[in-house]
Image (cartoon, helix red, strand yellow):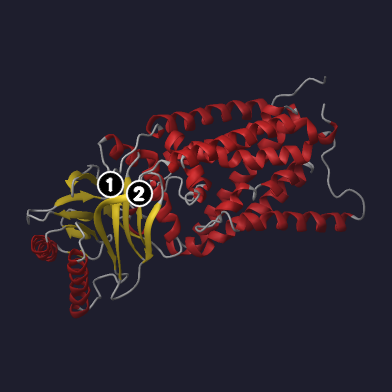
């Protein structure tokens, strides 16, 4: 038995009030790093150590104290999402979501604590990462918003470790990320008995970083055709004066013409520029057919169409020959568009010498859709989008990760977000914030050889569901009594 963990009680001595105040201060201090990690714009470097104080407190406290301190720290950390969630749902729903998320933290930390203290074995370093990967996998499969905000996405700007996603997808990336604080917590709370587990974890993390750096080092520089991205934050709604709506459409046309004059072979516009009746949508279709023919570029336009059957969120891809556009209908709908009809078909088209797929904003938050396009041979994804400003970074980087998982480049043009061009290695080749009229434009070269081979399409889901199965076993083991040595 490890004596360092045999009596897990902190803040012993003194009055009960003083002890409770110290515990509360410790829980709030542990929650501060989570605050900067759990929001829609996480600090990626902090994610490697932010859970450490919570885990250490849990391992060094009684079960009851560990429970309320973990819940308090998690609630403080998750409060960084309040402003963003209020954009999407009423306050009672926000509080309910935050409560569920805090309870998930409570489940993971208490289950980890139980296993570590009960078995006192090096293998328990795997409990924390396995449990989080299991929860993340279940959320991705079962929830309408998938695993939005997964801790794994915090590493989207860490290009070296991000290559783990090409091997085992988000489950593999999340496992590596959670292994670091787990090993540190056991080492600090349990002493040298956990040194072998910590050493093995360090070797695994070093291999992930070194392997990723080696993989990116051999990546070719961008040298393909030029692509243009445009976003004007202004939405053309039912209350928009006709003159104002016409000015916005005219500005988009000017941007397309200017980018074409600078050598762009294709131009990507954002999601749902307007929601129009069929006759109005047909007028837009004719205009952009003529614009594509006149400028000689491919143009992707995001548009909502409302007819007798309902409302659909579409992406139209116009060819330089002026033919009728290829149409793609959004599969995964955001909370404000629950009354829209969901699509189910995919679209891959040769564009400027590359096979390009169409998706819309939230579609790229779901790994199965990204994998379907990878299997269909897409070399580049064209993604019109509409963000909510506060989630601009998260929306863009979740899409970047899909590209790494499946080995293709991504062009994403978001209103109230960012214009982003990334390659199959997750390197952001060009990026710019969107803006209101007259809008923002970006011109960037695409990768000359955009596709790379990955294993994430089959290994990622396999690893994720393996973690679900192992976590179920661990939870059962945690409830069994261990005979005294």
- Mark 2 or 1, nearer chain start: 2
Q: Residue at x 63, y 52 (%)?
A: 74
Q: Position of residue 360 (x, y in %)?
A: 29, 52
Residue at mark 2: 221
Quarter holding residue 177: top right
Q: Residue at x 56, y 38 (%)?
A: 176
| Of the pair 216 and 319, the residue shown nearer to us | 216
Q: Residue at x 8, y 64 (%)?
A: 294
Q: With 67 as the anchor, is 436 left or right in this view?
A: left
Q: Is residue 127 visible?
A: no
Q: Quadrant of the N terminus?
A: top right
Helix, strand or loop status at disc 1? loop
Q: Position of residue 485 (x, y in %)?
A: 82, 19
Residue 43 has which mark?
none
Residue 448 has which mark?
1
| Of the pair 247 and 440, the residue shown nearer to us | 440
């Amino acid at each position: 038995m490890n004596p360092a963990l045999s009596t897990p009680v902190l803040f012993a001595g003194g009055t009960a009030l003083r002890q409770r105040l110290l515990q509360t201060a410790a829980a709030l201090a542990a929650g501060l790093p989570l605050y900067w990690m759990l929001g829609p714009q996480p600090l990626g470097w902090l994610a490697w150590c932010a859970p450490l104080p919570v885990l250490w407190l849990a391992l060094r406290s009684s079960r009851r104290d560990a429970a309320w301190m973990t819940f308090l720290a998690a609630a403080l950390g998750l409060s960084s999402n309040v402003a963003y969630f209020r954009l999407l749902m009423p306050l009672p729903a926000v509080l309910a979501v935050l409560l569920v998320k805090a309870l998930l933290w409570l489940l993971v930390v208490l289950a980890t604590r139980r296993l570590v203290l009960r078995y006192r074995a090096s293998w328990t370093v795997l409990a924390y990462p396995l449990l989080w990967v299991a929860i993340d996998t279940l959320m991705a499969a079962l929830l309408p918003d998938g695993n939005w905000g997964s801790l794994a996405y915090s590493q989207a700007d860490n290009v070296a470790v991000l290559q783990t996603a090409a091997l085992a997808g988000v489950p593999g990336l999340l496992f590596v990320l959670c292994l670091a604080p787990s090993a540190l917590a056991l080492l600090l709370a349990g002493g040298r008995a956990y040194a072998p587990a910590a050493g093995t974890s360090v070797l695994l993390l070093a291999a992930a970083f070194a392997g990723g750096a080696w993989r990116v080092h051999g990546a070719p520089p961008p040298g393909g055709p030029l692509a243009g991205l445009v976003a004007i934050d202004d939405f053309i709604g039912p209350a928009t004066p006709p003159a104002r709506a016409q000015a916005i459409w005219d500005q988009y046309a000017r941007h397309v013409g200017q980018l074409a004059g600078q050598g762009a072979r294709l131009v990507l516009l954002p999601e749902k520029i307007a929601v129009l009746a069929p006759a109005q949508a047909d007028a837009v279709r004719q205009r952009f057919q003529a614009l594509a023919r006149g400028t000689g570029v491919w143009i992707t336009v995001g548009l909502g169409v409302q007819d007798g059957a309902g409302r659909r969120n579409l992406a139209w891809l116009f060819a330089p020959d002026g033919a009728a556009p290829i149409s793609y209908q959004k599969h995964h709908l955001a909370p404000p568009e629950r009354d829209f009809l969901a699509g189910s078909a995919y679209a891959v088209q040769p564009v400027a010498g590359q096979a390009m797929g169409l998706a819309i904003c939230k579609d790229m938050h779901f790994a199965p859709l990204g994998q379907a396009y990878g299997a269909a041979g897409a070399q580049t994804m064209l993604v019109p989008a509409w963000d909510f400003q506060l989630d601009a970074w998260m929306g863009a980087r979740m899409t970047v990760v899909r590209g790494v998982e499946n080995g293709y480049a991504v062009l994403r043009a978001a209103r109230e977000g960012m214009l982003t061009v990334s390659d199959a290695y997750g390197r952001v080749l060009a990026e710019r914030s969107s803006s209101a009229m007259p809008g923002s434009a970006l011109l960037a070269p695409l990768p000359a050889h955009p596709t790379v081979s990955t294993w994430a399409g089959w290994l990622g889901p396999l690893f994720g569901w393996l973690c679900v199965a192992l976590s179920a076993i661990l939870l059962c083991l945690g409830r069994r009594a261990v005979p005294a040595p």
